[in-house]
Image (spheres, rainbow, N blue to C red):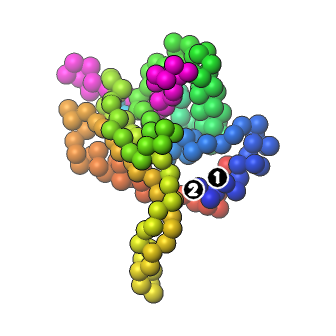
Amino acid sequence: MVRWRDNVKKDFEKREGEKITFMPLFVEAVVKCIKRFPLVNCSLDGDKIILKKDINIGMATALPSGNLIVPVIRNADMLNLVGLTKQVNNLANAARQNRLKPENTQDGTFTITNVGTFGSLTGTPIINQPQVAILAVGAIKKRPVVVETEQGDSIAIRHMMYLSMSYDHRIVDGSLGSTFLSAVATELENFDPSRGY
């Protein structure tokens, strides 16, 4: 994924007029997994579980004050990578310029926070209620890892990123939470480097 982005970012910006960051790629992977595990895309209202049909991804964004706000990419499942990139960039720029409107931060169904932008390898995110889950993505760093091949194991340098997730145990138990988190990791690990955008 890192190499793919490095290879396409100049052409992407020239063709689409937008810089492609990792966040749209994270959103794309999370949306695919939410479709497989819809219970992480719900809310709790008293003793009622409200399963959301829309997938509205909140993305924690730093304000100029240093505080965080969570603008929402509405119907993220209906957007391709170019559409996601435009939404991510528009919302992030609006947040940095204090131009977000109240409706830009409403109706999120799942949140992603990129603690890696602050240099953190990992973090323990706080659920953005009434949502029931939040994913934190850490800094992408090169690390030595064991690579298994038919010829045997070897140590190689790979880009690595830690994922962590918090979830409301009244809805999402450890099995579902861990399975969803593993699915997101697998989605990112199996990124197709020959894909277009």
Residue 79, percent from left and from top: 60, 37
Q: Give the amino acid at mark 1.
A: Arg
Residue 9 versus residue 130: which sits nearer the camera? 9
Q: Which residue is mark 2?
A: 1
Residue 149: which quarter of the image? bottom left
Residue 4 versus residue 179: which sits nearer the camera? 4
Residue 19, percent from left and from top: 69, 40
Asked if residue 120 is among those painted magenta in the image, a careful observer would answer: no
Q: Please, what secondary structure does the residue beneath circle 2 have?
A: loop
Residue closest to the far top: 102
Asked if residue 63 is among those painted magenta in the image, a careful observer would answer: yes
Q: Which residue is mark 1?
A: 5
Residue 50, percent from left and from top: 31, 26
Q: Are marks 2 and 1 in contact (CB under 8 Å)?
A: yes
The crowding category of the residue bearing disc 2, from other C-alpha atoms within 10 Å (few below 14, some 14 to 19, many at least 20), is some
Which stretch did the figure color magenta? 43-71
Q: Give the amino acid at mark 2.
A: Met
Residue shown at 41%/32% (left/top)?
A: 110
